[in-house]
Image: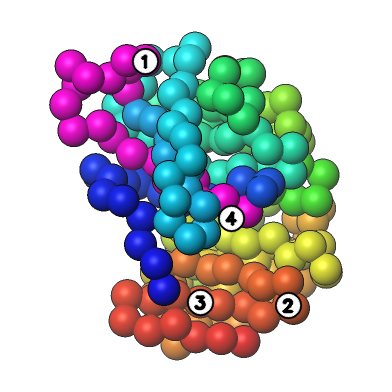
Amino acid sequence: ACTTPDTHNTRSIAFDLDNNLVISEIPKLSMFRPEGGERLKVFSLEGTYLRTIYFSGVDFKHSFDQINIDGLGNIVVNCPYYRRVYKFDPKGNRLHGFGTKGRANHQLLDPTDILFDNENNIIICDAGNKAIKIFDPKGSHRRTFGKAGKMGHQFTSPARAAFNPITREIFVADSYGKKVLIFSQRGKFIRSFVAPDDIRNIKITGDNKVFLMSGRRIFVY
C-alpha cells in the first residue's frame, strides 16, 4: 500500500492514459489559486507527485462534482450546479461544454455520473430526469433512454453506471431501487437484477467482474 502527499478537499479520482492517479482538489486558500478555481493533481501509482493541472476557459464559481478521462486523454468534468459538463484537453485547456437545466432529451437536471463507451461517447446518469443520456465526443445529444418507475426496467434513482467494453453493455446502479439495470450500448433494456443493498458505486474489471459498493460492503458478481 502507498499514500499520496496531503491534498485538500478532494472530490473525485480518475486514471489517465499512463495509468497515473488524477485527483480533483479545491485549494485551501483562494488567494493562492494562480489560475482560479479547482485543479487536478497527478500522482504515480506509487504516490509520487508528478504535476498539477489548472483549468483554463472556465471560471468554476461552484465546485464540480466528478471527473473522468476518455480514451484520448481528455478530461471531462461534471458541474451539477450548472447542469453542465465541460471537456478539457490533457493540459486543462477548455475544448467545449454542453448542458442546460431542463427535462428535454438534451438537457440535464441532476447529473450524478459521467463515463465513456468504446467510441468515447459521453454517458451521463441524470438522476433528476430518471434517465441515461448519451452525447457524442463533441457534446451533441445522441440518445436518451430509461424512465421513472419501480418495475425492473425503470429507474428510481440512476446514480452510477459502468460500461462493459467486452459486452458493450451499460450497467446502471439504481441506488434507491436497490437494483442494477443492464442496457445495450444503443439503450435497449436487456435485464436487471436485485442488489443486496443501496448501491453507491459500480465498477467493471477487465476480466468481466462487476463490483458493487454500498455504504457498508462491496459485492462481487
The quarter holding residue 168 reads bottom right
Callout 3: 10 Å neighbours few (<14), some, many (20+)?
many
Q: Secondary structure at mark 4?
A: loop
The location of residue 152, given as percent across then percent down, is: 60, 75
Q: CA distance from mark 2 to mark 1?
A: 41 Å
Q: What's the magenta region?
A: 19-37
Q: Which mark is residue 212?
A: 3
Q: Which mark is residue 147?
A: 4
Secondary structure type for disc 3: strand
Query: Tag on residue 58?
Result: none
Q: For the residue carrying disc 4, how many other residues have a C-alpha within 10 Å: few (<14), some (14-19), or many (20+)?
A: some
Nearest the eye: 112 or 16: 16
Query: Which residue is at 58% across, 35% downward?
Result: 75
> Which residue does the numbered mark 2 point to in the structure image?
208
- x, y percent for residue 18: 66, 48
Q: Estimate the spatial distance between the alpha carbons at disc 2 and disc 4, rounded to whole Å.
A: 27 Å
| In the rendered image, the vertical position of residue 168 relative to residue 50, given as above or below | below
Q: Are marks 3 and 4 in contact (CB under 8 Å)?
A: no
Circle 3 or circle 4, nearest the eye: 3
Secondary element under disc 1, as helix, strand or loop, is loop
